[in-house]
Image (cartoon, coloured by chain):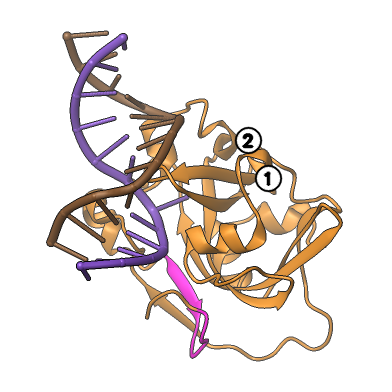
Chain colours: A orange, B purple, C brown
Amino acid sequence: MLPRTFYDRDTVTVARELLGKHLVLRSGGVERVGRIVETEAYLGPHDLAAHSARGRTARTEVMFGPPGYAYVYLIYGMHWCMNVVTQAEGHASAVLLRALEPVHNLEGRSQGPGLLCRAMGIDKRLQGHDLCSAEFHIAEPDGPPPRISIVRRPRIGVDYAGHWAKRLLRFYVRGNAWVSRL
DNA sequence: CTCCGGATTCGT
DNA sequence: CGAATCCGGAGT
């Protein structure tokens, strides 16, 4: 299991290093595992695409808290999205998990943040959950890590954020078939 | 209290 | 390209 210190670092670094790691959720006697192949970094209140840019609210409270917790929210009234909170308490930054390569017990497709949560069974009950826990965490896969090439692109769906929409804060594993879009 | 729109996905 | 579908956040 990744230690809390993994998340207590620069958000771009965490977003890049999460690629290739395993997201693990044990629920109802079933363990689901997916390999993270696509992420986006949301840097904090100064980042106009980040939810924390609208200030500290009930929904975004967990983003302002300590690193290594899940920020889960509902979008467009029907899809859950999952983030990992990064950096020290008060920084209000996070990494959005956008796509998984199926490893174990995933239900259907997992390319795109909404489909990822559907496949893993992630919803409101995991909002604010500790990711340094047996039932819900991110882990280094067994064996030697494969050498991967990382692609940097602008984030998806944040055109409203002015110049922040152009920043290269989306990361994915080059050539991976489970990435949501090229 | 009302109103607007979204870190998406799917079907046309 | 537009609908689905609901709640957070902002304004009255």
Residue on which disc 2 sits: A65
In the image, is B6 to the left or to the right of A15?
A: left
Residue on which disc 1 sits: A69
Q: Nearer the viewer, residue A68 or A32?
A: A32
Q: Find residue A93 and report its horizontal and vertical position in percent.
A: 52, 46
In the image, is B5 to the left or to the right of A61?
A: left
For the point 75% across and 65% down, the residue is A32
For the point 84% across and 81% down, the residue is A142
Dot 2, how many residues are within 10 Å of its Cα: few (below 14), some (14-19), or many (20+)?
some
Q: Quadrant of the N terminus of chain A?
A: bottom right
Q: Which residues are magenta?
A: A169-178
When the figure is inspected, residue A120 is found, relative to residue A50, above or below; the finding is below
- Whether residues under marks 2 and 1 lie with C-beta atoms below 8 angstroms apart, the answer is yes
Task: Name the chain under label 2.
Answer: A
For the point 65% across and 55% down, the residue is A121
Q: Please name the amino acid that badge 1 sits on.
A: Tyr
Main structural element of the magenta stretch: helix, strand or loop?
Answer: loop
Q: Find residue A56 and report its horizontal and vertical position in percent.
A: 47, 28
Q: CA distance from mark 2 to mark 1?
A: 8 Å
Dot 1, how many residues are within 10 Å of its Cα: few (below 14), some (14-19), or many (20+)?
many
Q: Find residue A70 and report its horizontal and vertical position in percent.
A: 64, 46
| One can see residue A90 in this view | no
Q: Please name the amino acid that badge 2 sits on.
A: Gly
